[in-house]
Image (cartoon, helix red, strand yellow):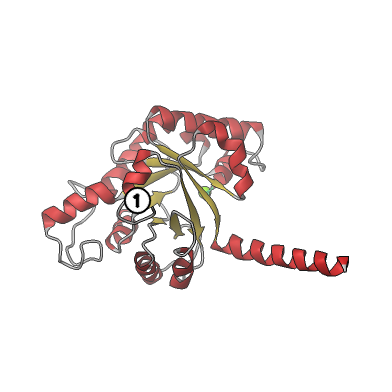
Amino acid sequence: MRTIANFATRFRSGDFIIGTFVKTPDPAIVEVLARSAIDFVVLDAEHAPFSRRDLDLCLLAAREGNLPALVRVTHSDPVSIQQALDQGAAGVVVPHVRTPQEAQHVARISHFGSGGRGFAGSTRAADYTRRDIRAHLDATASSVVVVAQIEDAEAVEHSEGIAGTAGIDGVFIGPVDLCISLGKTDVSDVTVQAAISAVARGVKIARKSVGIFVGKSSDVESYRNFELNFVLVRSDQSFVLNGADAACIEIRKTVSAT
Ligand code: 3PY
Ligand code: MG
């Protein structure tokens, strides 16, 4: 069953789970998605206009619906990662991780410890001072999920090293950026598919979770051999667009047939 409390365990155990992106910075979207079959959401602060306050309200809505919510930050920035986790995100997705050294940096700034995330007991994550230091350190170590995104040509050969970095729980493949970085414009191009396959293999060797973005559900078919542990399918925007188009097409077909 989906709960925030069991998310890290499910993610790390390699259970197959399905998430989606939230691109509209409104808590109502998260509230609605919490009533769907989705296992988790990623609030996309990289490519959508989320302010710190928007993230705060969306994370509150996610709690209300017991829906694990990760935040995709803009880059490996300690401030944004700390803020997302303090606000109660279940974890972070960090785009454009290219080397094991960058992965080590991401792991360090996402966890408490020397040179790492700063500590405050006053945050939502620390239950507004109701957790003492030890309890918050322990709870955070076991519950915060850190996902490195591989989406650059130069990262492909480092996938095992990136995934194998201590403190990195999994790798999310960004097929579109990877495609562009390989000089292509079609994700189904053999060069892009070979790169995706190489990344998935590297992550599997490192025994971490591997996932990918799919623009439509049927795309999962082409990744069946990769033993994916998670997919991010579409986004709230795409569900609205496709739902509206599908309803119109169906009605026009029915009307023109009568
Ligand atoms: C990509 O395909 O580049 C992504 O970042 C998917 O979210
Ligand atoms: Mg990308």
Q: Is residue 159 above or below residue 135?
A: above
Identify the image quadrant of residue 246. bottom right
Nearer-the-camera pick, 68 or 183: 68
Query: Which quadrant would the C terminus be assigned to in this image?
Result: bottom right
Q: Position of residue 213 (x, y in %)?
A: 53, 47
Q: Which residue is mark 1?
A: 7
The image position of residue 56, as x and y in percent, is 35, 68
Q: Residue at x 17, y 63 (%)?
A: 121
| Picture layout, residue 171 above or below residue 72 | above
Tell me: 107 left or right of 188.
left
Q: Residues within 10 Å of mark 1 (few under 14, many from 20)?
A: many
Q: Position of residue 37 (x, y in %)?
A: 49, 57
Q: Residue at x 44, y 56 (%)?
A: 42
Seen at 23% across and 66% down, the residue is 123
Amino acid type, label 1:
Phe
Q: Which picture quadrant has residue 218?
A: top right
